[in-house]
Amino acid sequence: MMLRHVIAKELRECIYGYRSLLVFVLSTVLFGVAIYAGARQYQAALQEYRLAQTAHRQQMAEPGNLYALGNFGFDLVKPPPVLGILVSGIEPHAPRVYNVAIFTLPEPRGSSATEGLTIAVLGPLDLIFIVEVVLGLAALLFTFSAICGEKENGTLKLQLANSLPKDILLSGKLIGNLIGLLVPVAVSFLVACLMLISFDGVSLNAEAVLRISLLGLDFLLYLTALFAMGILVSTLTSRTTTAFGLCLAAWVVWVAIVPRLAVLAAQQISPMQSLQEFEMKKVEVHRRGSVEGQKEYSRYLQEHNRQSPPLDVYYDLTSRIRERQNRELRLLEDDYLQKKQRQERRAVLLSRLSPAGSATSAAMSLAQTGLERDLRFQAALGDYRSEFTRYYDRKTHEEAAHAQNSQALPTLTQDLSDLPGFEFQDESLARSLDRTLPDLGLLVFWSAAFFSLAYVCFLRYDVR
């Protein structure tokens, strides 16, 4: 009964003080702007992907020059994730288009950031930014004066004089203020998500709806952790001005500094070569492959009285050189990617020292806009390149055998209708949950830890 009265009192203050209304209006406007901007970007990326798919299918359906296709390559485009509308993740900075050829590993052709440098500098306005930065600060402002403010007003001593236990008072303040903030935010989030169905090209299946629901849970757990932090700061101080300054400092450290320090720390713990050095090593591998190919070709001419090799011998020669060169490139890229992934994973792990790091990691896993999706797409490209290389070798050997038997010149065009298509499947929800649950558990831990410390401090708090 006492807890209910404390919760009702805090809710009345949130409502009559217009704090809940202000949060509702602010979150509704910001969520709406973020959804609109994200949907427009998704529509543009989806149109680009569909055009690329159509062009690729037409290219494969028509007779073409397999030699030119294999050596100069063709482009494959990564499909945009629909939930990138809500959480952009690394998608604005990751390449969308890759060139696939038989003599080179899949090469990226720029990223979304190259098309919008302002986004690369300032960062996108998505829901995770709004929740972590704007609403996270609002959560601290809701609670920084919960205890010390009442002490300054003299009401704290009066409440505790009426046989009101401290744990009931502290729990009531937390729950009441949480309801006063989370309900308006939850309603705004629901309204913003309902906007998605009004945009052309945006379709949500049952799994996407479930992912959105888990995203909402992630945001609510993050705001709860910030609430508990605000309560803790309020129990550590006696003046509201001091509590306000400490809350701002805590917000800056936990939201802005710790995740970025995690990246710097990961770079020091797991150093790696620069991208420029890696590209120079790849160029050196290509150069050595060209030199070795010229030497073997010259050696054949010397051994056969300067006669050009038959097509089957020429294709075998180039195939051996290509395999040797690709083997070196794969070893080089595997070493680079392993070091890069190790550094990135350590940065994510260290960022979890902050509630913001855990919330961001969970949001990107649920929205499928994190590192894992980019790595899965690159792995799928590598598998398809191997499949295309086997197809290329089979078709060229068939062409060479046909030309030799018929004593005719090889044709420049071949039927490519049997070329296997490229398919990319996003990971299942169960796999995403495997990575998300630890982050959600950490957010629960932060909330429990902050509130427990606040309770211990409040037991010793001087209410006079």
Image: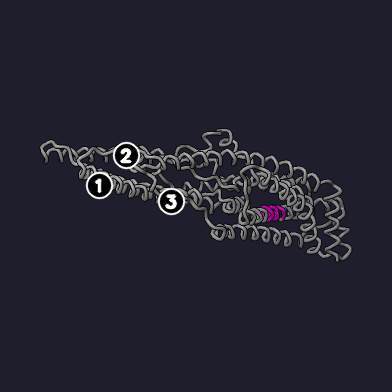
Residue carrying label 3: 379
Rendering coords of residue 168 (x, y %): 80, 64
Q: Separation of disc 1 and disc 2 at Cα?
A: 16 Å
Callout 1, which amino acid? Arg
- Asked if marks 3 and 1 touch (Cβ < 8 Å), the reply is no
Which residue is rendered at x = 36% and y = 42% of the image? 101
Main structural element of the magenta stretch: helix, strand or loop?
A: helix
Pointer 2 or 3: first along the chain? 2
Which residue is rendered at x = 80% and y = 48% of the image? 20
Q: Is residue 460 above or below residue 326?
A: below
Which residue is rendered at x = 45% and y = 37% of the image? 109
Left or right of 264 on screen, residue 394: left
Q: Is residue 220 magenta?
A: yes
Residue carrying label 2: 67
Question: Nearest the camera: 227 or 166?
Answer: 227
Left or right of 100 on screen, residue 151: right
Pointer 3 or 1: first along the chain? 1
Q: Give the label, 2 or 3, closer to the camera.
A: 2
Rendering coords of residue 298 (x, y %): 17, 37
Question: Nearest the camera: 188 or 221?
Answer: 188
Secondary element at tag 3? helix
Q: Which mark, residue 320? A: 1
Left or right of 65 on screen, residue 400: left
Callout 3, which amino acid? Ala
Left or right of 182 on screen, residue 355: left
In the rendered image, the quadrant that contains the C terminus is: bottom right
Q: Give the label, 1 or 2, closer to the camera.
A: 2
Rendering coords of residue 301 (x, y %): 14, 38
Secondary element at tag 1? helix
Q: What segment is highlighted magenta in the picture?
A: 219-227
